[in-house]
Amino acid sequence: MISNIIPGLLMILTSFLLPTIPQYFRQPAMLLSVGLSALSLFNGYGTFLEWDVLGLNLILYQSDSLTFPFSIIFHIAAVLVIIFSWHSKNLMEHMATIAYAGSAIGALHAGDFFSLFIWWEATALTSVFIVFAGNTKAARDAAMRYLIIQVSSGVMLLIGACLLLYQTGNHNLTVLDLTTDFGIFIFIAFGIKAAFPFLNGWLQDSYPESSVTGTVALSAFTTKLAIYALARTFPGTDSLIWIGAIMTAFPVFFAVIENDLRRVLSFSLNNQLGFMVVGIGIGTELSLNGTVAHAFVHIIYKALLFMSMGAVLYRAGTTKASELGGLYKYMPFTTIFCIIGAMSISAFPLFSGFVAKSLIMSSLGGMGMVLIYFVLFFASAGVLEHSGIKIPYFAFFAHERKSKVKEAPINMLIAMGIAAFLCIGIGVFPKYLYQILPYTVEYQPYTIDHVISQLQLLVFAIIAFLFLVKFKLYPSEIKSTVLNSDWFYRKMLPGIGKPLFKKIGLLTEFIYENLRFFFRLILNKSHKFSNSSYIKVTTPSFAATILISILFIMLLIVLL
Amino acid sequence: MKKNNLTSMGKSFTKYILIIGVLLILLDFTFHRHEYFSFAEIYGFPAFFGFVSFVFIVLLGKWLRKFLMRKEDYYDQ
């Protein structure tokens, strides 16, 4: 029986039941629902549930070698988030989180574009409550912008799906290309959620505004769902290589100057998505394996980094680099876990990032794409800069701290501990990760050439950091806002739109005033006319005069 | 003593990282490092690339502040 239930659906049902469950049983209930949903992982591959509705055959539950690794990691991420937020009493956030994770897992198993659309919107509608739960004015404003962008992505997807069905008679998830109009709509829909260049503003806008625990949940699902969807429908699309390369390189510069460390991590998340997008663009078995592996390990170490910054926010009350520093003394475990996350994302050998990124780099190298290869190599130094050094350095070191803070609560430490364990475990034993990848490819990440090359890059980038700090060339942290692509709709459009609408408003008011004057004139005249004494006998009543004049105006309009 | 904790940590970290750096460069001379592109096989190429990239990223980022940086309450105005 359980094999026919859509994975994730039980988690959504649990979300609805959550208010009826006593406080202390909520987290266990959520964990139980994730566990039951995870049983679907043992079902094997195939189509398990279809539904004929309105003449459409919806494939609600299917699984194959591509959904499998994503489904595993989404379940793991859900568990991490639940443990990390164990202390929290925010019911709305818990409900949103478990429903959001469930929707994302459900989306993975959709077999057609319409089912995908339903889940796609479900992830948007559930996750917006997580942003809301940040419970500040900034968070509420960001949530509204987030909702608009996410729903537009869904609308794009729906338009694409309808066009696809109309033009081809098929609506199943298949490989598409960019020569068709539906292909372009669906590509943009996925591109918004995958935070393509200039479509990325929502990510850095909303994630850092969420609560201590909310950002961890957000970081795992939406963007990786988009990566999954791109890998399924657009593998081998050349333009993705360039889009991905731009995504790896550009956020790096923004991350250097951003002051809010959770926003730095959001830029870093964007940069990591770039690596995955490049892998999809290459489209070989090795590179697609690389994308999936990278998404898998990325969810863990990015969650770990967001958790460590969440713990800092929880205890120190801010994640602004300009106000932090010296926390290593008070939060030693968080410091260690953060450094493990930082080393994983920077792809140090024996950490998870290394064994995943290598697959993408090797497929680029094997194809002889020298320029893209070095853009990504360059971006790797950038990753080290913002996530490897900046995050741990400014939060935990930089300078001594005057006021004391407590170490993170035990549940947070457990969640971070599990994530850190997985980061190192996968880094040391990559074969377990490689076994669950979509294609069977023999690959050995730990060759002497590769290890030395990567170590040289990283160690000398660290030396560059020390050099810049020593000679006071490293930019100090300044309280500031860094402009990003959300500027276009937060400043530029209102900047143009507000005066424009004001002018239009004035114009309509002017027209309205004149019309009113005109009608009053007719009214008065007809009143006078109907009341005049000498033609009283033959003239119709006041109402009839108005009627006649209206008919006369209509006649004029028709004739014109 | 306590006051100098971070400075001494920083100093020893710098020392060790420099030693590792030198060792990594020396290792390059002991074997032929195979790369996908022949120019990357030059001694210490990844080290040089890493150093230059890092400096470039930081300095360009710093310069970009001129165009991208606004006050903290920029969007609230």
Image (cartoon, coloured by chain):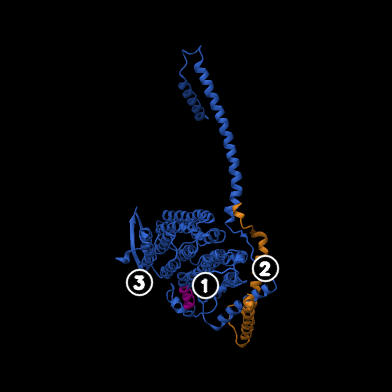
Q: Which mark is residue A167?
A: none
Residue in the foreground of this view, choosing between A301 and A560: A301
Give the chain of mark 2. B
Q: Which residue is mark 3?
A: A42
Q: Within the magenta stretch, is there residue A419? A: yes
Q: Main secondary structure of the magenta part?
A: helix
| Residue at far top of view | A534
> Which residue corresponds to mark 1?
A334
Q: Which residue is mark 2?
A: B59
| Image depth: mark 3 or mark 2 in front | 2
Local packing at callout 1 (Cα closer than 10 Å; few below 14, some 14-19, many 20+) is: many
**In the depicted structure, whether residue A544 falls above or below residue A461:** above
Indicate whether residue A64 is drawn in magenta: no
What is chain A's hue in the picture?
Answer: blue
Amino acid type at mark 3: Phe
- In the rendered image, residue A278, in percent from the top left (x then y), is placed at 53, 68
Q: Which tint is chain B?
A: orange
Tag 2: residue type? Leu
Percent x, y of residue A472: 69, 71
Q: Give the secondary structure at mark 3.
A: helix
Q: Is residue A375 visible?
A: no
Task: Name the secondary structure under disc 1.
Answer: helix
Check the image and name the residue furthest to the left.
A1
